[in-house]
Image (cartoon, coloured by chain):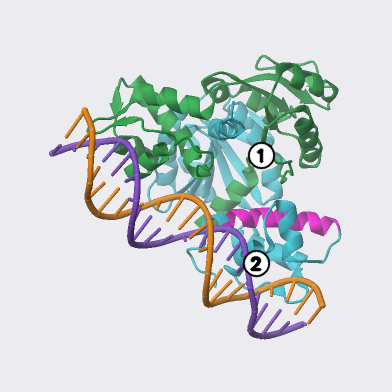
Chain colours: A green, B cyan, C purple, D orange
DNA sequence: CCCTGTGAACCTGTTCACAGCG
DNA sequence: CGCTGTGAACAGGTTCACAGGG
């Protein structure tokens, strides 16, 4: 197993499994069945087993999965068993909230720097992270070997920033700007489209 | 057409089409082909045509789609041709950033109130929106007929809030809390899982 | 006997190719 | 002749059902 064309949706669910496993661990559980993993997440047992099967055999027939063991495996698969350095570009209200968001650090991500065009923001510190001028971006990305970036700029600025980041070696971009980014092959964009997600709900609830 | 079991992914793309149409409109374009609509979004022309076909026939053969006309149609389909009232629960850093996020208002959403357990936050105003105690939630949701809510509380509080919101008549919940919400049929949750999205990227870029 | 891992059937969404209209 | 709308072929993911191990 461990092949490289695993369904994207399976990988997305891995994060959900990881979160549930952490909860089960806190509750003192040592083993968990695919069913017990799946149902509180609104998924089916078969789906959990299929998803995990893409990456190896982690369970014990008749028993289930070892909570701690599977947690470690999933972290390894997702690449968050070691801390990953991340930078933020765009230190507006949303960007600053992300710098302070506890959920990133607890899942293995650490902001090492933030960048903004505004001289009013440069030099300030939010949630222990310093804001630098854009001109420092190349140096800091390269010296820290940063491969993940979060873009929280206005839409107009996002593509230019993305182009620069790709040039400096960034491989993954979490994009909060309301625009579709074009990136070269080998660079992945994770769009977080706030307005679009609300529009989705608006559609579903009808009028 | 206009049937009720349209692919979810098609509806998601409707938001992207809408954004591109707004841009084309600003640039002065009056007509647009499926190809010109699709490619800057990283999609194919056939996909655009198929998506739109779920809702009706909007194009003119040999010409394309009327930019302004299609914009109106999409807004109507998404239910954002009239302003939708939204409430926020959880006025922490992330919640406050969302109150100030311009992208919601410009797409037809308006926060009418925010709620928080913290007395330090209650009574304050962020981005013109007032923060109320949770105890006021029932009254305000019902009096405004609010059907959309955004949850930006810690994970532990989210399910309780969601249960209450459902009871008060909310039909759609945008959930930023890192937990899977259980809701009764008829209520839709749009999860925005920040850590999971970064984990996704972490997986894709490898080690 | 319970629960995993997995081939096979099923189903949903995407791509293709073209008929038909402006 | 260009571009839409659409049936038909295709691909991918999900569900089912069961073989096999603890």
Identify the magenta region: B10-27
Judged left or right of residue B66, residue B83 is left
Describe the element under mark 2 as helix, strand or loop: helix
Q: Is residue A82 visible?
A: yes
Query: Would residue B103 appear left or right of A159 to someone viewing this image?
Result: left
Secondary structure at badge 1 equals strand
Compared with C19, A76 (above or below) is: above
In terms of depth relative to the viewer, which is nearer, A78 or B22? A78
Tell me, yes or no, if residue B154 can be seen here.
Answer: no
For the residue pair D9 and B141, the one nearer the viewer reads as D9
Q: Are tags 2 and 1 found on a single chain?
A: no
Q: Residue at x 71, y 33 (%)?
A: A151
Identify the subunit bearing mark 2: B
Where is residue B13 shown, x and y percent of the image? Answer: 62, 55
What chain does mark 1 sit on? A
Q: Is residue B21 within the magenta segment?
A: yes
Q: CA distance from mark 2 to mark 1?
A: 25 Å
- Residue B143, which numbered label? none
The x and y percentages for residue A5 are: 53, 43
Q: Which quadrant of the rendered structure holds the N terminus of chain B?
A: bottom right
Do the residues under discs 2 and 1 have CB atoms within 8 angstroms? no
The residue that mark 2 highlights is B49
Residue A77 rendering spot, x and y as whole percentages: 49, 29
Query: In which image quadrant can residue B39 be found?
Result: bottom right
Q: Which mark is residue A189?
A: 1
- Callout 2: few (<14), some (14-19), or many (20+) C-alpha neighbours within 10 Å? some
- Quadrant in which the C terminus of chain B appears: top right
Residue B35: image x %, image y %?
74, 62
């Amino acid at each position: 197993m461990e092949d490289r064309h695993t369904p994207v949706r399976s990988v997305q669910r891995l994060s959900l499994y990881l979160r549930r496993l952490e909860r089960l661990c806190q509750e003192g559980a040592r083993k968990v069945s695919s069913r017990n993993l799946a149902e509180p997440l609104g998924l089916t047992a078969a789906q959990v087993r299929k998803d995990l099967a893409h990456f190896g055999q982690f369970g014990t027939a008749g028993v289930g999965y070892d909570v701690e063991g599977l947690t470690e495996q999933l972290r390894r698969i997702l690449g968050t068993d070691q801390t990953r350095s991340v930078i933020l570009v765009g230190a507006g209200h949303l960007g600053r909230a992300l710098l302070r968001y506890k959920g990133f650090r607890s899942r293995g991500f650490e902001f090492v720097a933030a960048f903004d065009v505004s001289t009013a923001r440069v030099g300030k510190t939010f949630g222990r992270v310093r804001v630098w001028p854009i001109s420092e971006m190349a140096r800091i990305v390269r010296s820290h070997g940063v491969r993940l970036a979060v873009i929280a700029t206005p839409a107009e600025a996002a593509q230019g920033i993305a182009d620069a980041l790709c040039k400096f070696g960034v491989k993954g971009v979490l994009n909060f700007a309301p625009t579709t980014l074009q990136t070269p092959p080998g660079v992945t964009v994770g769009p977080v489209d706030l307005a679009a997600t609300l529009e989705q709900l608006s559609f579903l609830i009808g009028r």
